[in-house]
């Protein structure tokens, strides 16, 4: 199913085909251990190079849509999960979690790169790819491990600044 | 504010209250977390919170450990929304049901939109409209932070919102002179300029009329402002009653929620008798901001 809208002269298409949902199900299950059944009540749609999550039941026509749902996954090249998606999936994520503390998270948020050995009790084998950064047992966003086992934050700059201010008060 | 001396009960207490700091309230976001979990985490940080007996999910922030509750990890993660108790009454009065189609005609920054999504448990569809580009950012950020998935954000002039329903329910929380926020902003304490009130009331009438036109017969419209000016409140609803097929639905408030009835006359103007079933929330009654709320049914 695909719905098309006009916004600022451009045609926007929301493509709700089941293939997109399968990609999401499989990716988050394989990489983060998210149960496939948890996607049953949601819709996944494609916009450009991104997959979005939504639960709305109707898409009225003739509306200038600015945004709908929650951005889940960039699918150009290797799939990349968004920080907001990993936060939303926090209760379901069981693997590839890098557990940080105040010091290591602060360094990552300031652009630092740390070896995986700095993160004890993490649930990852250090294999290259995207990981969920956790703090105090809660997923705070997306990170990445390079082939040499180096961890880097992928949390957007604005959100990273906000989180740094929060950490400074702890 | 002196022009309201005849309509606001215990006017001296009202004026004194405007000089006092407004309490802070949070609404726990049950789309993401349980009440127990949030309160337990915040109490460990040193916040003292007290459950509001008459408003589901709301807690008053009684004391802080020396910094704002918005500067916590749990706020950043969208576990709660800081929302005054007076606007916190609006979405429950709209009473959205699961799987319905809802329109929030002037939605930014998203406090009421996210509250509606929470009541609907992320089901159905909310169209959250905001015409002002600069305000769209806060609406998008808040819906994202709160994990709202059933909402489509649109940008239209509300008065000319396209025929896209009909909607089961429409919330029209209009731009207003904001006198009800006088405790937060010193400059509002003297009251709004009458010229501004007159000009904004035209916009408010247009928005309410469009909201009624977009609602299905039998559907519900809630009109709200955060101001005391009858020209922006009862006069606007009275105008809609005269020009659109609709009727007032009495708002049933619990006895423990202090409030006043809507006016049926003001400075020589007479309004429909049914406007007494709309409500006015005054700061000295509820220890909150000010609010006017009317509930209508499309005929």
Image (spheres, helix red, strand yellow):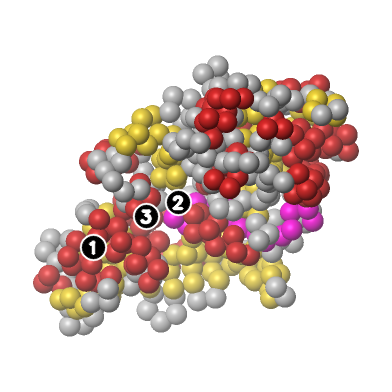
Which residue is more in the foreground, A18 or B126? B126
Q: Quadrant of the N terminus of chain A?
A: bottom right
Label 2 sits on residue = B146
State the residue lying farthest toward the right.
B243
* Secondary structure state at the residue bearing disc 1: strand
Q: Is residue B236 magenta?
A: no
- Residue B120 placement (x, y as % from top left): 54, 40
Determine the CA span between mark 2 and mark 1.
22 Å
Answer with the quarter of the image where residue A28 lies: bottom left
Dot 3: chain letter:
B
Report the disc number at residue B76: 3
Report the disc number at residue A97: 1
* Secondary structure state at the residue bearing disc 2: loop
Q: Which residues are magenta?
A: B144-160
- Residue B162 placement (x, y as % from top left): 77, 56
Answer with the quarter of the image where residue A163 lies: bottom left
Q: Is residue B150 magenta?
A: yes
* Secondary structure state at the residue bearing disc 3: helix
**Residue A74 in view here:** yes
For the residues beneath circles 3 and 1, the answer to whether they share a chain is no
Neighbour class for label 3 at 10 Å: few (<14), some, many (≥20)?
some
């Amino acid at each position: 199913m695909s719905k098309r809208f006009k916004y600022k002269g451009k045609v926007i298409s929301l493509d709700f085909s089941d293939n997109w949902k399968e990609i999401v199900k499989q990716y988050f299950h394989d990489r983060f251990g998210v149960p496939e059944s948890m996607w049953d009540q949601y819709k996944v749609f494609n916009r450009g190079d991104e997959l979005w999550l939504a639960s709305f039941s109707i898409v009225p026509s003739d509306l200038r849509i600015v945004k709908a749902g929650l951005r889940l996954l960039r699918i150009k090249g290797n799939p990349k999960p968004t920080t907001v998606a990993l936060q939303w999936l926090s209760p379901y994520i069981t693997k590839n979690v890098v557990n940080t503390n105040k010091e290591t998270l602060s360094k990552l948020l300031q652009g630092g790169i740390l070896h995986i050995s700095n993160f004890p009790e993490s649930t990852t084998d250090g294999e290259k790819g995207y990981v969920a950064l956790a703090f105090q047992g809660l997923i705070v966003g997306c990170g990445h491990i390079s082939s040499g086992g180096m961890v880097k934050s992928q949390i957007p700059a604005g959100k990273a600044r906000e989180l740094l201010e929060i950490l400074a008060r702890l | 504010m002196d022009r309201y001396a005849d309509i606001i009960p215990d006017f001296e207490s009202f004026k004194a209250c405007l000089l006092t700091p407004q309490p802070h309230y949070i609404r726990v976001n049950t789309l993401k977390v349980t009440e127990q979990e949030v309160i337990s985490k915040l109490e460990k940080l040193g916040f003292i919170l007290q459950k509001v007996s008459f408003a589901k999910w709301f807690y008053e922030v009684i004391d802080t450990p020396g910094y704002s509750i918005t500067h916590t990890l749990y706020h950043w993660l969208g576990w709660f929304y800081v929302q005054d108790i007076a606007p916190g009454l609006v979405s429950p009065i709209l009473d959205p049901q699961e799987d319905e189609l809802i329109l929030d005609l002037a939605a930014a920054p998203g406090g009421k939109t996210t509250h509606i999504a929470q009541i609907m448990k992320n089901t159905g569809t909310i169209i959250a409209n905001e015409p002002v580009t600069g305000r769209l950012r806060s609406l998008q950020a808040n819906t994202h932070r709160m994990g709202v998935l059933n909402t489509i954000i649109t940008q239209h002039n509300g008065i000319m919102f396209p025929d896209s329903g009909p909607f089961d329910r429409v919330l029209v929380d209009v731009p207003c002179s904001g006198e009800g926020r006088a405790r937060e902003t010193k400059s509002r304490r003297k009251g709004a300029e009458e010229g501004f009130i007159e000009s904004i009331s035209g916009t408010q009438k247009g928005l309410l009329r469009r909201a009624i036109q977009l609602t299905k017969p039998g559907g519900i419209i809630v009109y709200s402002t955060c101001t005391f000016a009858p020209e922006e409140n009862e006069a606007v609803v009275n105008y809609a009653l005269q020009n659109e097929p609709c009727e007032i639905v009495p708002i049933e408030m619990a006895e423990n929620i202090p409030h006043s009835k809507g006016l049926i006359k003001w400075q020589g103007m007479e309004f429909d008798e049914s406007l007494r079933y709309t409500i006015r929330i005054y700061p000295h009654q509820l220890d909150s901001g000010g609010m006017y709320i009317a509930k209508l049914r499309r005929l």
